[in-house]
Image: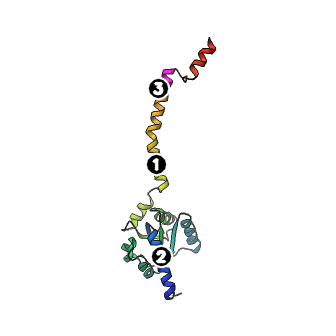
Amino acid sequence: MSLNRSEKEAVISDVTSLAAKAQTLVMAEYRGITVADMTRLRNDARSKGVTLSVLKNTLARRAVAGSAFEVVGDQMTGPLIYGFSEDAVAAAKVVADFAKTNDKLVIRGGAFGGKALDVEGVKQLANIPSKEVLLAQLLGLMQSPISRTARVLAALAEKRGGGETPAEAPAAEGVAA
């Protein structure tokens, strides 16, 4: 079904606004994927904040012109699904995880930070932990010295006090007398 001029302009403007907000673009060839599998992929992507779109490549090239994703304009050939995400790793993670279970989805490339990514680059980006995991790891690293110091001080106090806390020691002496 062919789009008229105003519909094409609307598609280009929608994708341009997506590209302006997104940090990552992942492109994958979807030839041979069943409707049920594609629906599962779209639902998974939607739940993780990734926008998947099947677009005509000429419209996609026009939409990303002038954006950080323009570097992959020459790779936009064939039946592609485009994944845009504001989270740096979400689009790559969704597409790469789905590609592991469905060999019909073939990652073609992507872009991040104004640089084109090949297939291996997309897979490496997908292997980076999410922002929440990285923050939790950082917090754990920051808490580690403090908790170790607290354990050492508690062990020293226990060793010196014979296992009694200072508040318990006078109460125990008063009962014994």
Residue, disc 2: 15
Select label 1 or label 2 by which is in front.
2
**Three-letter code for the amino acid on which mark 2 is drawn:** Val
User: What residue lies at 51% left-to-right and 67% top-to-bottom?
Assistant: 50
Q: Is residue 159 magenta?
A: yes
Q: Are marks 1 and 3 in contact (CB under 8 Å)?
A: no
Q: Is residue 113 left or right of residue 8?
A: left
Q: Which residues are magenta?
A: 156-161
Which tag, 1 or 3, sits closer to the chain's start?
A: 1
Q: Secondary structure at mark 3?
A: helix
| Viewport quadrant of the N terminus | bottom right
Q: CA distance from mark 1 to mark 3?
A: 29 Å
Binning the other alpha carbons within 10 Å of mark 1 as few (below 14), some (14 to 19) or many (20 upward) gives few
Residue sitting at the far right: 175
| Viewport quadrant of the C terminus | top right
- Residue 77 at least partly seen: no
Residue, disc 1: 137
Whole-percent x, y for residue 163 in the image: 54, 23
